[in-house]
Image (spheres, rainbow, N blue to C red):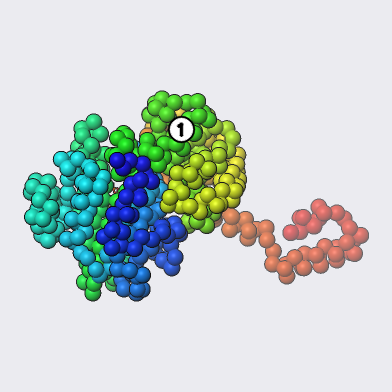
Amino acid sequence: MIKSGDEIRQAYLDFFESKGHLVMDSAPLIPKNDPSLLWINAGMAPFKPYFDGSLEPPKKRIATSQKCIRTNDIENVGKTARHHTYFEMLGNFSFGDYFKEEAITWAWEFVTEVLELDQDKLWITIYREDEEAFKIWHDQVGLPEERIVRMGKKENFWQIGTGPCGPCSEIHYDRGVEAGDSKEDVLGGEGDRYLEIWNLVFTQYNYTEAGEYKELPNKNIDTGMGLERVASILQETETNFETDLIKPIIDQVVEMTGIPYQQDQESVTAYRVIADHIRSASVAISDGALPSNEGRGYVIRRLIRRAARYGRKLGFKEPFLYKLVEKTAEIVKGVAPDLKKQLAHVKNVLKSEEESFLKTLEQGLNILEEMLAELEAENKEVLAGKDAFRLYDTYGFPLDLTEDIAAEAGIKVDEDGFEKEMEAQRKRAREAREETSFSSGEVEKLYAEFKAQIEEDNFTGYHSLKEKT
Ligand code: ATP
Ligand code: MG
Ligand code: MG
Ligand code: MG
């Protein structure tokens, strides 16, 4: 029986190889020649030139397991059962070759016959107007009408920026009421009960810079299935975080702190965030990213700082993230073998980044916590922009970090107020420069006066010079 993450990945790639696909390695997380994208965020992303026809693919059918980073899911990490900043997307692609029929029937064959998922727990969504997809699910696969749910553009039309796009059909797994019982626990909702596992995108159009949907000369298939989510079903874990793709990292941190994983909600979240962020940061660094103050580097910095901050909640006083890299490399070796080769480099980067962060963090955190406690005592819900600015100016706290921490106490930050302080600071800096700096000509003049004065009255001292200027 297929169970481990490695087994699922292999079964998937073998299955699609048997259907005539070329199995390729994951592309690096840093996109090549694609300024529209900070990170590879889907299996199809490295293949955009094949989809829009600007490059010829090595084969018309390709299958991969692609490492992905999605920073837009950062706030979800630890909150939902299914979101990570780093995850693996299994995908099969057709570049002007097979289309909906094969994509749908093979997907069904894989989940029901290879993975042996319980058919009664599977639900399908399709794009409202996609009769073709409905017919295939209904007439060919043989699903009853009530299992095929029609959704709108927001849920079932796939599009990220410009480029290939089209209607999609998704496979969901009902994890039962125990997994979630809120009004969000419906198909396509934000809850965790109906777990979206596989998105089949029928790429029929190209969305242009001019905002037009142009029918592609050749219709394509782009699918994406989250490996961690499938693993959570087969391993019968409560969330993705207890699968063999993440749990060993959590176990190592638990060993280091002595605090049980499930001690309380706070510990659960902290362990999950740390395990998630160490995966994204270390794989990204091994792919060539480095912490910095902008763009990709800033994402890395933010991931490391967030993980370090959650580490502090678990009692860490010293850098610890670098100690998790070996375990992480072992887990991801099937998709990101380079991490093993880059261990020393990745550890060094993590260690020095965490060290420098911890220094300022400690001081700033204490002050922020005092501020928040005061607000709570006064039943106030907004941290003044002036206070957030002080943390920024004196302790190097970026606004989003202050917002993250404040949000945990249910407190918002006055962003406009922060911006006003920031502007005032810039103005002060400009004025200060004007007051204290002299053009070289002015300096020369001053020296000349100084010299003349010394010669004139045999130097009466700095005092008189000061009065003159
Ligand atoms: P969700 O609705 O759960 O946020 P999505 O619709 O944003 O998922 P897609 O863009 O359709 O996801 O990506 C294809 C597949 O990749 C999903 O069906 C899911 O299995 C997986 N996936 C997407 N985002 C994540 C994530 N942040 N962490 C783990 N797996 C993910
Ligand atoms: Mg999403
Ligand atoms: Mg979705
Ligand atoms: Mg989706």
Q: Secondary structure at mark 1?
A: helix
Give the percent coordinates (x, y) of residue 356: 60, 43
Query: Residue at 17% across / 50% down in the picture?
Result: 125
Give the percent coordinates (x, y) of residue 316: 54, 32
Pick the quarter of the image with the N terminus: top left
Residue 92 horizontal side relative to residue 168, left or right: right
Residue 327 horizontal side relative to residue 224, left or right: right
Give the percent coordinates (x, y) of residue 51: 30, 68
Amino acid type for the residue under numbered disc 1: Asp
Front-most of 184 and 141?
141
Give the percent coordinates (x, y) of residue 78: 37, 38
Query: Residue at 24% across / 34% down in the picture?
Result: 180
Front-most of 463 and 91?
91
> Which quarter of the figure has residue 153?
bottom left
Query: Residue at 20% across / 64% down in the picture?
Result: 99
Residue under label 1, please give it.
251
Is residue 421 in sight in this rendering? no
Is residue 279 in sight in this rendering? yes
- In this picture, is 147 found above or below 41? above
Residue 410 horizontal side relative to residue 299, left or right: left
- In this picture, is 203 found above or below 276? below
Q: How many marks?
A: 1
> Which quarter of the figure has residue 440?
bottom right
Q: Residues within 10 Å of mark 1 (few under 14, many from 20)?
A: some
Pick the quarter of the image with the C terminus: bottom right
What is the residue that sits farthest to the right in this orientation? 458
Front-most of 231 and 67?
231
